[in-house]
């Protein structure tokens, strides 16, 4: 049984949890997929968390509860008990879900497995870390997307099985290159670097802006910066964009992009750029590889495990705007980008939702049959 977000909610967790549910259903191993009617209240997240186009509405999904409305939870409890699952699988990424998940994981005799996107919220407070540990402590095993997260979980919960599988490529319906560039106003002959997704401090967007500000006159690189600034990030980004050296260098959409617009940004791009200061994994990296885009990323966490330097992209030290600027100039070479794009397409075929579901099933077997001392077969960088 899978408990987590799906249609009509937006965001990477809803997309990946839905894709996992589809894969498990195709393999005949999904007892139920219980999804929320509502997720974040306005006091916690000021924007809308709904986008009906963000992920498909699939038949197994049953909308059964609201995340922060405890009076709706008894219906979820009854549905879990009626399904009699072999295990309950939940995604973990934010403390906002912790009260619900803490209850869910004490309602039944079946073991629990967490798909750990983040061991705690990015930039987590002490309270958020405490909430995360409270949820994860109730789980018999963990699925994660990078060895760095595996090491964190193994240190925190020794003896519990951990399985590793990178996020499979996400499907983006791209707009044709010429039309996409026309829509966004990308100059003819420009090499477009796409920095996409929520703008939060750990993502290092200011580093890539500094790198582009230092590019020499005549360099054809243009930055496509698309995503919603998180809280105080809007003012900081606006201040950097006021640098006259960035005039004509950056095309922005500093807001949430509905799914209908995402294809234009990926269609117009030549390279994806992820200047993160830290990373557990990245759905954007998976999207980029799935589209055959080379990736310019920092050598941190899960990014350094997915991006192969010189094969699928380029890796630079985190926080080093100079190194990033030099990499941008190198990636303006058509020949280099073509070679890395071919590597990206090959790499993307290694990881599928079918292989992801298979690894999760093995983990559930280990937890259900072997207890906390069992360890499933591990699948990492070369997972098929």
Image: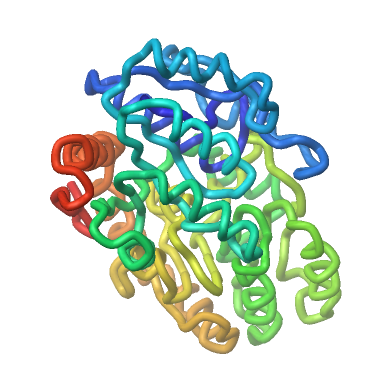
Locate residue 179: give its quadrant. Answer: top right
Residue 212 percent coordinates (x, y): 65, 77
- Is residue 353 rendered to the left or right of residue 204? left
The quarter of the displayed image where residue 149 is located = bottom left
Query: Is 260 in front, or is 337?
Result: 260
Name the side, left or right, on which 179 lies relative to 373.
right
Asked if residue 2 can be seen in this view, the reply is yes
Q: Position of residue 66 (x, y in %)?
A: 65, 25
Q: Which residue is nearer to you in this view: 156 or 24?
A: 156
Q: Residue at x 35, y 54 (%)?
A: 145
Q: Quadrant of residue 240?
A: bottom right
Q: Quadrant of the N terminus?
A: top left
x, y (%) of residue 20?
A: 37, 33
Q: Residue at x 58, y 49 (%)?
A: 94
Q: Is residue 146 above or below residue 246?
A: above
> How was the colour assigned to the protein in this rendering?
rainbow
Residue 340 seen in the current view: no
Residue depicted at x 60% and y 55%: 196
The image shows a total of numbered marks equal to: 0
Q: In front here: 110 or 225?
A: 110
Relative placement, left or right, of 11 versus 145 is right
Q: Kindly identify the residue that appears in the image at 34 percent across and 59 percent down.
A: 157
In the rendered image, residue 25, in percent from the top left (x then y), is placed at 31, 20
């Amino acid at each position: 049984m899978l408990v987590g977000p799906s249609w009509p909610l937006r965001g990477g967790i809803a997309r990946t949890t839905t894709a996992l549910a589809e894969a498990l259903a195709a393999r005949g191993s999904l007892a139920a997929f219980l999804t929320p009617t509502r997720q974040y209240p306005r006091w916690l997240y000021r924007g809308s968390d709904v986008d009906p186009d963000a992920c498909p509405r699939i038949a197994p999904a049953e909308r059964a509860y609201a995340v922060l409305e405890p009076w709706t939870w008894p219906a979820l409890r009854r549905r879990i008990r009626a399904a009699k699952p072999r295990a309950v699988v939940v995604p973990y990424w934010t403390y906002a879900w912790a009260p619900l998940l803490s209850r869910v994981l004490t309602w039944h005799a079946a073991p629990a497995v967490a798909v750990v996107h983040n061991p705690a919220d990015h930039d987590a407070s002490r309270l958020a870390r405490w909430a995360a540990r409270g949820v994860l402590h109730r789980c018999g095993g963990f699925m994660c997307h990078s060895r760095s997260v595996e090491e964190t979980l193994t240190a925190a919960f020794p003896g519990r099985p951990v399985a590793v599988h990178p996020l499979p490529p996400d499907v983006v319906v791209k707009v044709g290159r010429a039309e996409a560039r026309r829509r966004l106003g990308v100059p003819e002959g420009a090499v477009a670097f796409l920095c996409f997704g929520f703008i939060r401090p750990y993502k290092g967007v200011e580093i890539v802006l500094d790198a582009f500000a230092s590019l020499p006159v005549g360099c054809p690189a243009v930055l496509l910066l698309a995503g919603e600034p998180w809280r105080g990030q809007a003012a900081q980004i606006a201040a950097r964009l006021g640098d006259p050296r960035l005039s004509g260098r950056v095309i922005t959409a500093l807001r949430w992009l509905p799914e209908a617009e995402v294809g234009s940004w990926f269609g117009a791009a030549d390279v994806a750029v992820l200047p993160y200061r830290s990373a557990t994994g990245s759905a954007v990296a998976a999207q980029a590889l799935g589209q055959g885009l080379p990736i310019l990323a920092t050598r941190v966490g899960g990014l350094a495990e997915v991006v192969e330097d010189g094969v699928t992209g380029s890796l630079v030290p985190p926080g080093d705007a100079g190194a990033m600027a030099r990499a941008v100039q190198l990636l303006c070479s058509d020949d280099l980008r073509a070679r890395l794009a071919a590597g990206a397409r090959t790499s993307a075929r290694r990881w599928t939702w079918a292989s992801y579901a298979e690894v999760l099933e093995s983990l559930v077997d280990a937890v259900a049959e072997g207890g906390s001392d069992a360890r499933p077969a591990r699948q990492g960088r070369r997972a098929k």
